Image (cartoon, rainbow, N blue to C red):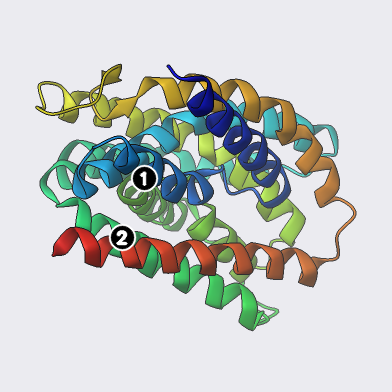
Amino acid sequence: MHAQLIVELALLGLATGFLAGLLGIGGGMIMVPFITVMLTNRGVSDGLAVKMAIATSMSTIIFTSISSVRAHQKRGNVRWDLVRGLAPGIVLGGALASMGVFASLKGAWLALLFAAFVSFSATQMFLDKKPAPTRQVPGAVGLTAAGGLIGFLSGLVGAGGAFVSVPFMTWCNVAIHNAVATSAALGFPIALANVAGYIISGIGLQNLPTYSFGYLWLPALGVIACCSVLTAPLGARAAQTLPVKQLKRVFASILYLLAAYMLYKGFGAAN
């Protein structure tokens, strides 16, 4: 592996680890566009590059989630009751997405889906609509259904689920700092369920780059995971000092930029 690639992946890991801790996004929304660029620059077709970027970014969330959650838990911000309620649906939804729908969809469609869902999440954050004061977190059935949707959408776009789970929890009157911390904890079951599916569905594919395991690109996984765990706690500490509205707008601004790039890649892969 070339030194330049190692440096690029290390910088990406440091940046995404910090943002994962700060915003609870697991890093996936940041990594997918950049890993797509790296793979296409190395001769991988646009469609396959998008799929591998999604799968690889999801796999790194296993590590960033653990590091970020430890920092959030020290401040008592993780709502473990919500984690327990959402996790079963997340595992089922993630398995369905990664082992079924993900493998059958073209990379161009996945890129467009990524852009659409990220744009929706960013808009919700910018509007900063206040939920009805009487609205509460749903019961067990409602949480399982919500978890299934979060896991399924995360499996299609390679993200830790914060683009759905954070708006969902704030809509249910969960405080933004609790929602961000809980979203970071949810990244672990989301990543485990989906990564298993990406490996199974990608085994035996042709034209994969060197050091691939199913849809996973192992060099990116190794370097990004090692670097991101160093900065995720720093992001979690920074999240405590930012006002709620500013935190939402930082989240939304980043998502808009990445949605625009993936929209461009999606149309490019379709042509």
Tell me the tag on residue 265: 2
Residue type beneath disc 1: Thr
- Nearer to the camera, 27 or 183: 27
Residue 102 placement: quadrant: top left
Q: How many marks?
A: 2
Give the residue at x 54% y 40%. Answer: 186
The residue beneath circle 1 is 36
Q: Is residue 267 above or below residue 152?
A: below
Give the residue at x 26% y 55%. Answer: 110
Give the residue at x 53% y 49%. Answer: 30
In the figure, is residue 262 to the left or right of 166? left
- Nearer to the camera, 110 or 80: 110
Q: Is residue 125 above or below residue 69?
A: below
| Residue 33 in view in this figure | yes
Q: Position of residue 67 (x, y in %)?
A: 68, 27
Q: Is residue 114 above or below residue 116?
A: above
Residue type beneath disc 2: Lys
Circle 1 sits in a helix, a strand or a loop, which is it?
helix
For the C terminus, the image quarter is bottom left
Q: Is residue 81 above or below residue 111?
A: above
Q: How crowded is the residue under tag 2: few (<14 C-alpha within 10 Å), some, or many (20+)? A: many
In the figure, is residue 187 to the left or right of 47? right
CB within 8 Å, label 2 to label 1: yes
